[in-house]
Image (cartoon, rainbow, N blue to C red):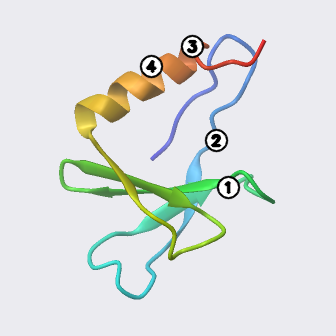
Amino acid sequence: MSMTAPSKGYMIMTLSFAHRAPGDGERTWRRASRCGGSGCVEVAISGAEIAVRDAKRSDSPVLTYSAEEWRVYIAGVKDGEFDLH
């Protein structure tokens, strides 16, 4: 997965560092290439489902979203909908 920099001056990082953890089945988890500390998540795309988990704990709960839910979320991020003011 790769994303471009929106015009609002912040960057959405390219996801890299793919890996599979025991028990993940067919999921390949990816995290931002600039993830260097806390606050990072990993994303896995499996069919029509997008899964998200805490990057620090591979055993953390997994949140799943449909492709449409994920598309709407990414559009909101790019539009600044979740920016802290």
Other residues around mark 2 within 10 Å, as few (<14) / some (14–19) / many (≥20):
some
User: What residue would you read off at disc 2?
Assistant: 13
Query: Is residue 72 placed above or below 38 in the rendered structure?
Result: above
- On the image, the x and y values in percent for residue 72 come to 36, 22
Alpha-carbon span between mark 1 and mark 4: 21 Å
Q: Mark 3 points at which residue?
A: 81
- Say which of 85 and 71 sits in front: 85
Q: Which residue is drawn at 70% across and 11% down?
A: 8
Residues at marks 4 and 2 touching, judged by CB atoms closer than 8 Å: no
Tell whether label 2 touches label 1 (CB within 8 Å): yes
Look at 80% across and 59% down and name the residue there. Answer: 37
How far separated are the C-alphas under marks 3 and 4? Answer: 9 Å
The circle on residue 33 is 1
Camera-near label (4 vs 2) is 4
Q: Where does the image place residue 20, in percent across and percent down from the top left? A: 43, 79
Q: Quick one: label 1, few (<14), some, or many (20+) residues within 10 Å?
A: few
Q: Which of marks 1 and 4 is in front?
A: 4
Element under disc 1: loop
Mark 4 highlights which residue?
75
- Spatial distance from mark 4 to mark 2, Cα to Cα? 15 Å
Amino acid type, mark 2 = Met
The crowd level at tag 4 (other Cα within 10 Å; few <14, some 14-19, many 20+) is: few
